[in-house]
Image (tube, grey):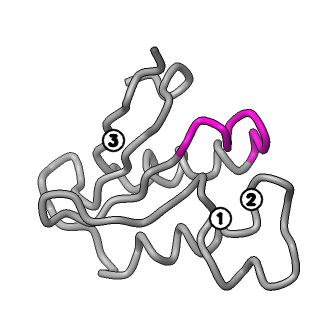
């Protein structure tokens, strides 16, 4: 996978060897850390909602975080943090290619 060309990256809460990633709220925690990174930058109270560039969700019963490539362009270090979190924890990733 080459996250550098993706429109969106789906970080799945399943490790490469098929185990469910713990803690169970990992997706919400990761998206919460990324909440200040948003179009127009952090605003007062923005920590109370998720960034549209990094959203936790459940797909087919699996917790995921959907990361939009706009994050990579606006905040490259934040993008690297999220992608490296997935790699360091051996989480499965899928991508939606830009057209």
Where, by quadrant of the figure, is residue 51 drawn?
A: bottom right
Alpha carbon distance from label 2 to label 1: 6 Å
* In this rendering, position of residue 86 left or right of residue 23: right
Residue that appears at 52% across and 19% down: 5
Query: Residue at the location (13% across, 66% down)?
Result: 61
Q: Main secondary structure of the magenta part?
A: helix
In this picture, residue 97 sits left or right of residue 21: right
Looking at the rendered structure, the secondary structure element under dot 3 is strand
Q: Are marks 2 and 1 in contact (CB under 8 Å)?
A: yes
State the image coordinates of residue 98 (x, y, percent, origin top left).
47, 20
**Left or right position of 35 against 67:** right
Picture quadrant where residue 73 is located: top right
Question: Sequence-wise, which precedes: disc 2 or disc 3?
Answer: 2
Q: Position of residue 91 (x, y in %)?
A: 32, 51
Q: Specify the segment rendered in magenta.
A: 68-77
Q: Which residue sits at x=87%, y=73%?
A: 43
Neighbour tally class for label 3: few under 14, some 14-19, many 20 plus, Cα within 10 Å: many
Q: Please report the residue visible at 62 percent of the width from the left and 78 percent of the height from the top.
A: 49
Mark number displayed over residue 37? 2
The image quarter containing residue 26 is bottom left
Q: Residues within 10 Å of mark 1 (few under 14, many from 20)?
A: many
Residue found at the far top of this picture: 99
* Residue 15 drawn in magenta: no
Disc number placed over residue 34 in the picture, else none: 1
How far apart are the two marked residues, 3 and 1, measured between alpha carbons?
18 Å
Question: Which secondary structure lies at badge 2?
Answer: loop
Which class describes the residues within 10 Å of circle 2: few (<14), some (14-19), or many (20+)?
Answer: many
Quarter of the image that includes the N terminus: top left
- Residue named by callout 3: 93
Could you tell me residue 11's position as x and y percent?
37, 50
């Amino acid at each position: 996978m080459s996250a550098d060309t993706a429109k969106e990256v789906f970080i799945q809460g399943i490790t490469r060897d098929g185990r469910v990633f713990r803690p169970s709220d990992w997706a919400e925690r990761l998206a919460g850390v990324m909440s200040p990174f948003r179009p127009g930058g952090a605003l007062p109270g923005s920590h109370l909602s998720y960034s549209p560039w990094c959203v936790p969700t459940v797909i087919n019963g699996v917790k995921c975080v959907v990361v939009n490539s706009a994050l990579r362009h606006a905040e490259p270090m934040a993008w690297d943090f999220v992608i490296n979190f997935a790699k360091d924890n051996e989480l499965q990733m899928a991508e939606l290619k830009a057209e």
